[in-house]
Image (cartoon, rainbow, N blue to C red):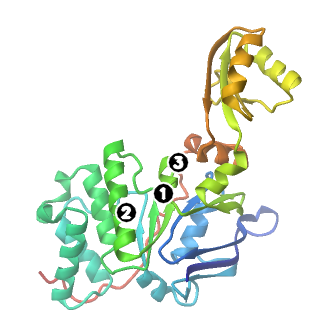
Amino acid sequence: MKIIEVDNLVKVYGKGKRALKAVDGVNFSVEEGEIFGFLGPNGAGKTTTINILCTLLLPTSGRALVAGHDVVRQQAAVRKSIGLVFQDPTVDEQLTAEENLLFHAILYNIEPASKRRARMETVLKMVELYERRKDTLKTFSGGMKRRLEIARGLMHYPRVLFLDEPTLGLDPQTRHHIWSYILELRERENITIFLTTHYMDEAEFADRIAIIDHGKIIALDTPDALKSMVARDVITVHTADDERMAEIVREQFGLDVRRNPDGRGFSFKVDGGAEFIPKFVEQSPVHVLSISLRRPTLDDVFLELTGRQIRDEEVTDKDRMRQRARMPVRGHIAR
């Protein structure tokens, strides 16, 4: 069953000659219970598309359904169906963990008070923060705050959870723990996860990945299928004269050569890299300082399709989801 359906989605900013088409006829769907990765360079249309799906931005044309609800005509129903963890921290450090969740429950009109308390207990235990529920967030680590934001996004039992860079800036161990919770959540609740990330190892968790560039989906498939698009081994070489050696590789082997982003050495792709390397080093007229072999990764796919490496992208993109859905607060906080 499709939980998200996007049909010929278009978003244009401005008019006339200054018009900018940020999203250009995007089509894709997401299955219920799927982890769907959405990747793209800054300015590719990724954030704009997500903002439309989360009802934070109106499309120029096209149609999008989330949990069967139209994102333009049924915004309230869409918002009740989704949870959203923003890239920027949005919890209040002056409040306790419990108070942060309580405020969210009031915004979503979760009633009665006994129901709110039960849900708060459930999600806090799910992310292992129940024992710290009375503590202010000033005493929490970055990983604990992120776990609380995920718990908050689950308070109203959403069918789709949008995670915008869920582990950005966290240490590897904390990132691992966060992903343990996310994967367990998917299995336990059959919740759909819509993910953006700059970490390609995290993108590997996705069942399918869509790569968007210049407002268009340029690839959509499983991680393994995407990597098969660049299935040749990647050889990285640094020599005493990289310019000369790169030219030799182009002329003698007819291979496409890319300079490494750090300016040291270059890379090219071959079949049978393990057999290629000894012959290459032995016959090289230029002294080889270092050479390495690796199998294709999602980084390679991203570079192949967009001409950029995702880790080179500005993480502090000004076009993040900074807007907030405005919903009326009803009733009073009940403890």
* Residue 230 x %, y %: 71, 45
Tag 1–tag 3 contact (CB < 8 Å) = no
Q: Earlier in the sequence, mark 2 or mark 1?
A: 2
Q: At numbered mark 1, what does the secondary structure look like: helix, strand or loop?
A: loop
- Residue 43 makes an appearance in the image: no
Q: At numbered mark 2, what does the secondary structure look like: helix, strand or loop?
A: helix
Q: Which residue is mark 3?
A: 200
Residue drawn at 23 percent across, 79 percent down: 119
Residue drawn at 50 percent across, 78 percent down: 32
Quarter-wise, where is residue 283 in the image?
Answer: top right
Q: Earlier in the sequence, mark 3 or mark 2?
A: 2
Tag 3–tag 2 contact (CB < 8 Å) = no
Alpha-carbon distance for marks 2 and 1? 10 Å
Checking the image for residue 205, the label placed there is 1
Q: Residues within 10 Å of mark 3 (few under 14, many from 20)?
A: some
| Amino acid under disc 3 | Met
Is residue 293 depicted above or below 284 in this figure?
below
Q: Nearer the viewer, residue 241 or 285?
A: 285
Q: Earlier in the sequence, mark 1 or mark 3?
A: 3
| Amino acid under disc 1 | Phe
Question: In which quadrant will I find the N terminus?
Answer: bottom right
Question: In which quadrant will I find the C terminus?
Answer: bottom left
Alpha-carbon distance for marks 3 and 2? 16 Å
Describe residue 123's horizontal placement relative to residue 322 as left or right.
Answer: left
Q: Which residue is mark 2?
A: 182
